[in-house]
Each structure stands twice: as C-alpha cells, then as structure tokens.
Amino acid sequence: MTTGQRVERLEREVRWMRRMGALAVAVAAAVFLVGQGKDKELPDLEVRSLKVVDKEGRRRASLITVDDHGAPVLSFRDRHGRTRVMLALMPDGSPDLSFQDRHGKRRAALSTTPDGSPELSFRDKDGKQRAALTTFREGSSRLTFFDGAEKPRAELVALSSQGPSSLTLYDPKGDVIWKAPED
C-alpha cells in the first residue's frame, strides 16, 4: 500500500468517525431535549430501522433494526456492506455481542445464557464452536475446547469455593479418557 493510499484510507476513516461522532452528539442532544421536555408532551419517533450510509450510499451501520424474531439489533458493516460487529437482544432477552470475519462468519461472541451466566466463545473459519469460557451464577467457571465436530475434547472447571478444580479430556466419542483429580 502506497503512502497516498494510506492517507486516503485514513481520511475515509476520519470522515466516518466524524459522522459517527456527529450522530452520537445528535442522539445525546435528542436525549437531553427529551429530558428537558418533561412538562410537555413530545411525539414519539417510531421507525422500523435507522441506518447510516457512507457517501457512496453503502450501509455502514444499522443503528436500530428489528430481526425476524422481533429482537432489536445494532450492527456495523465494513466498506463492502458485510456485517462485522453486531449487538443483539436475543428472543429469550439475553444480550449477544458478536464479531464476524470478512466472509460473514461468526468468529467470536460475548453473550449471556438465559440464566444470566456470561459466556465468551470462539469459532473457526467454518463457524464451528472451538472454545468457550463460561462463568456460572454460583461463581464456578468452565473453559471448554471443542473438536471440528463441536464435541468437547478438553474441559477445565474452576469451582468458586466448593472443592478442587478439575481437568477432563475426552475422546472423539465423548468418553472420558483422563481426569484430574479423579472422582
């Protein structure tokens, strides 16, 4: 990449950041004005979606959309229109923040399970889950590694205060081949 191309790319990114900043200021001003109008009845703004486009008209961010299940979604797209970052509220009410690669495959996600336990997961280039870190409500944590068929192959469990941690290794069938400490 030449210096001129780098400068041009940097200028595009700065313009995009300025637009995002202006949008953030507009949203903050709207929130402020709504707060100031408590004595007055202000009309609601109802839209099905709110999208930000670049100067070529390509969608760069979907600030508010509703998916097929009625869940709100915030997404950011690259210059080719592919979603790269998405924040969604799942149908069960749990939040999900995901990161997609340039091919649109979900590669990493930070979410909560329906019971509120946080989970960080990683996927391979085919979208298959390969690792997950979960912290449960009672305080224990589990780190699991999966094979290409998404079967657990190794699991490290750290208990909060009730006993020792454990490490378990599984064969491709899911049978335990080694565990420490042994039960």
Image: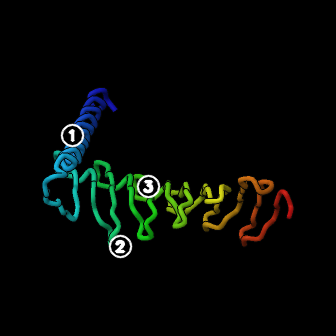
Disc 2 or 1, which lies upstream in sequence? Answer: 1
Q: Are marks 3 and 1 in contact (CB under 8 Å)?
A: no
Three-letter amino acid code at disc 1? Ala
Name which residue lies at 61% across and 68% down.
149
Three-letter amino acid code at disc 3? Leu
User: Looking at the image, what colour scheme do you see?
Assistant: rainbow
Which SS class for mark 3? Answer: strand
- Gap in angstroms between the C-alphas marked 3 and 1: 24 Å
Q: Give the residue number, with chain letter if any, for mark 1.
A: 22
Q: Give the residue number, with chain letter if any, for mark 3.
A: 97
On residue 69, which mark appears? 2
**Percent of width and height locating residue 94:** 46, 63
Which SS class for mark 1? Answer: helix
Residue, far right: 182
**Percent of width and height locating residue 98:** 44, 55
Disc 3 or 2, which lies upstream in sequence? Answer: 2
**Percent of width and height locating residue 128:** 54, 63
Three-letter amino acid code at disc 2? His
Name which residue lies at 18% across and 63% down.
46
> Tag count in the figure?
3
Between 129 and 181, the one lying in front of the other is 181
In the displayed structure, 90 sits above or below 121; it is below
Whether residue 45 is visible, yes or no, is: yes
